[in-house]
Structures are given as C-alpha cells and as structure tokens.
Image (cartoon, coloured by chain):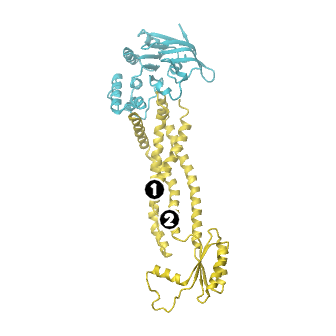
Amino acid sequence: MKHWFRLHGLAFARTVKALLRQPFSNGMNLLVIGIAAAFPLGLYMVIVSLAGVAQKLPVEPQLSIFLKADAPTDTGTALLAKLKADPAVQAAHFVPKAEALKQMQAAVGVDDLLAGLDDNPLPDAIVVKAKLDASVERLDALQKELAANPAVESAQLDSAWAQRLQQLISLGQHVLQALAALLAAALVLLTGNAIRMQILTRHDEIEVAKLIGATDSFIRRPFFYFAIGQGLLGGLIACGIVAGGVAWLNPAVAGLAAAYGQQFQLTLPGPLEVAAVCATTLLLCMLGAGLAVRRHLRKYH
Amino acid sequence: MIQFQQVTKRYPGGFEAVRNLSFEIQAGELLFLAGHSGAGKSTLLKLIAGIEKPTAGAVLVNNQNVARLSRASLPYVRRHFGLIFQDHKILFDRSVYENVKLPLDIIGFDGREARRRVQAALDKVGLSGKEKLNPISLSGGEQQRLCIARAVVHRPAILLADEPTANLDRDNAHDILELFKSFHQVGVTLVISAHDETLMSDYGRRILRLKNGQFTA
C-alpha cells in the first residue's frame, strides 16, 4: 500500500513538474477547457434562473370567468357542466361569491371587509384549468366564446404566457443538451490531443523507462494525472467564468426585470453545480487521456 | 543463468541478425562479445533483455523463456538487468541525478533510500559532485559513466553493456572496463560487447566471437 502511494506520489510530482515546464501552452489548454465548459454551464444557469421564476407561476393555463352579478345561479351551473364536458378542459369549479369573499378576506388579512358595504360586491366565478397540451389557439377561442356569453361579465385567459415561458425553457433545455454533447466531445478530443503532444515530447523518457522495466501503468500514470489536473482546473475556470459573467450581467438583468415590475436575478453556480461541472470535465479529460494513451503508447514495448 | 537454445532472429525484410545460436552464461561470469558491427552483438543483447523476440529457439533467463513472457510480467524481468545502451539513451531534459534515479522511480524506492543509492552509484563511477549538472555538459567518458551508474543503481544481477567503450580513448576505455571488473568481483554477471578485441584480451576472460550472426572459433 505504501509502495502504491509512493508510486502515485512520484507520478503526481512529475506531472506538476511537467505542467510547470510548459506554463504557457498548458495554461492555454486550461483556458480552452474552461471556456468550452463555461458555455453549457452558463446556459444552464440562465435556464435554472428562468425555471425558478416559472415555477412560481401557475403552469397550467387557467381561465377565470366572472359571471354577471344578476345572472341566476342555474346559468352558472349549466355553464360549469358545459365546460367540464369540453375536451380542452382538465377541471373546472364554481366559486360562489360568498366563498370568493372568504378567500379575499384571508388573503388581505381583514376579518370584516364588508363593513361599510351593503352587499357582497364580488361576482360568482368559474375557474377553469385547461389541459396542459391544449393549444393556445383553442384556449383563445374558448375565451372569446365565453366572453360572448350574455351571462358572463368577463373571461380572462390567465397563464398563456406562462405556458409560452415553459415552452421556451423546454427549448432551452434541448439546446443545452445539444451544446453540452458537442462540447463534451470537443473536450475529449482536446485533452486527447494535449496528451498526444505530451507523449510525443516525452518520447525519449517513455522509451528508456520501458526498456529498463517500467510497467504500462507507470508510463500511463503521469498522463492520467495530467488529465485529472486539466479536468479539475478547467472545471474551476469554467465556474469562475460563469460566476464572473453572472455577476457582471445581474445589474442589467435586474434593471430589465424591474422595468416589468418583477424581481429577477441570474443564479450563481452553487457548490453542487461546481462539483458537477468539475466531475464532468474530469471524466471527459480522463476519457480523452485514456483514448490517447491507448492509441499512442501501444508502439512502445 | 542465461541460456540460448538454437536461437535465430530474423528482422522484417529477411535479414538474419542471429543464426541458430546455442550457448550458456553462468551466474557471475564476465563474458565478452566480439565482432564487427553488424555481426549480431546488439541483437544478442536485446534478445537476452527481451527487447527483441527470437524468430526461432528459446532464450532462458533464470529458466524463464523471455519470449513467452506476458506483456505484464516483462517489466519485472527487465528489472533483473542493468542495461547500457550503445546510443546511451540519456535524458537531456533533466539533471545527472534525475537520470540515475529513473530506475528507482520505476521500481518505487522511497526518497531517502533512492538518494542514498543514487549517491553511491555516482560515487562508484566517479561522478559525485556533478549531480545537478545537465548531462549535455558532461564529456563522452562521463556520459558513459552516467549510463553505467543508471544501469547499476538498482543493483541488478546481470549487466548488459552494448559497446560501452566505443568512441572512448584508450585510457577512458580502460577505466570503464576496470569499473566492470569491480562489479564482476562482487558477483554481478556481465555481458559486454565490443568490436575492439585488444581491450578484452587484457582481461583474459571468455570471449564469444560473432560473425554474420554465428560464432567463429
């Protein structure tokens, strides 16, 4: 065991020396890895931030139908039955004016809202939850139809834009997946190439070491350490780039959101994201190193 | 200790470097290989160390057939040998000390023991005080000594030297051979190749003469 640690310690020391021997080209490599990984991470942070906003919104498109104050109760019941039968509707329920008042009192925190009023001014309402897959056009048509109903004071389609945001986020996730896959492949090739260069520059050393009794793993070890170092540092650089970008963009983003009366900030990568990014770049770099080492060390016997 | 049984080595292209050779080297022996360049001396040494595999026949080292060894066990067999290469194979991107330490790193010696052994090896070949130099600044004779220090630092039982005295003047060559003699005296088995026989005869040991891959009388 001690022996094993010593061999790894030596390999690690040689790797650090090798990295420091060519600080410029290795630094460039690290930057490229960092930038490549920063793209998907940055997009991911934007999506996570937007999804956070979207989650607070009602996701299912919702129609609120307010009945005329003088409409008899049975028109409301008839309309409710008709809506429940509509294929685009997932659920509909009747909110009598008395219940609406109770909800309002609870929301405002006042016990007696009616003091000073003769009557409950709120209308009876029907709240309709549309099916998630109902198209926006179908819901628009339904809203127009309801608005035209003589018993209906007004009909509002509440959350079509929330649905659009949801679809945008879903599109963003697809773009993210494609981007991540492409850049993952790029990282593997990049590290593979860096390791190939290392193997070429250390040709003499590898040859002599093999001749005087080095095992394959002794030869491979420093290259894997090199890949580990590149993966971890590259991942950290990516997180640094994204954190810097988020910090730089946030004042502008907050200003834009404030113009819409919203509070919105891009989220900084947390420890979990940092760990995930570093683990991913690490794995990809190891994979690249593995391929390069397999391919280029075969000729030494 | 080392046994050749009807060994033939044919390189790709059909050139036969070694033809049907059978001989044995006893443990503790000091053996010279003589012959012109191209006679098969280097190939013979490479066959012993398992760097080349015989086309026919068997090379036994400690009763193990070197050619039959798996890729995984070959490195451990190589560690029984100290190799001195004709083209030196010195690494010029590191110091004299680091060059000599390489075999110990490969085996995995700890720092203190490694330092002690490297120092002892450098003392033995007369290079103490030059540890930190880059080998490029050493003279030809000193580079050869560096190779010897690297070959003996892990105290191998068998030392294989390919033309260690080539390109050296007579005094330097004698010093090198004296060095080998001192290893021989402590029980190391040595196989040394050279094209200059006058040097060997001074040492009065067994000489195998090669010509076109075969022994001559």
Left or right position of B148 against B9: left
Q: Considering only vertical position in the picture, is B164 above or below A150?
A: above
Please tell me which residue lies in front, A280 or B202: A280
Q: Considering only vertical position in the picture, is A82 above or below A12?
A: below
Residue at horizontal 66 percent and vertical 72 percent from the top: A88
Indicate the quadrant where residue B17 lies.
top right
Please tell me which residue lies in front, A118 or B22: A118
Left or right position of A81 against B160: right
Which chain did the renderer colour cyan?
Answer: B
Dot 2 alpha-carbon crowd within 10 angstroms: few under 14, some 14 to 19, many 20 or more: some
Q: Which residue carries the number 2 mark?
A: A49
Left or right position of A77 against A233: right
Asked if disc 1 and disc 2 are in contact, CB closer than 8 Å, the reply is no
Left or right position of B153 against A296: left
Is residue B52 in view from this perspective? Answer: no
Residue B47 in the image, given as x and y percentages of width and height: 53, 20
What label sits on residue A272 in the rendered view?
1
Split into 4 quadrants, where in the image is the N terminus of chain A? top left
Dot 1 alpha-carbon crowd within 10 angstroms: few under 14, some 14 to 19, many 20 or more: few
User: What kind of residue is marked 2?
Assistant: Ser
Residue at horizontal 63 percent and vertical 21 percent from the top: B14
Q: Colour of chain A?
A: yellow
- The subunit carrying tag 2 is A
Q: Considering only vertical position in the picture, is B182 above or below A176?
A: above
The kind of secondary structure element at disc 2 is: helix
- The subunit carrying tag 1 is A
Q: Considering only vertical position in the picture, is A77 above or below B32?
A: below
Please tell me which residue lies in front, A212 or A84: A84
Residue B181 in the image, given as x and y percentages of width and height: 38, 15
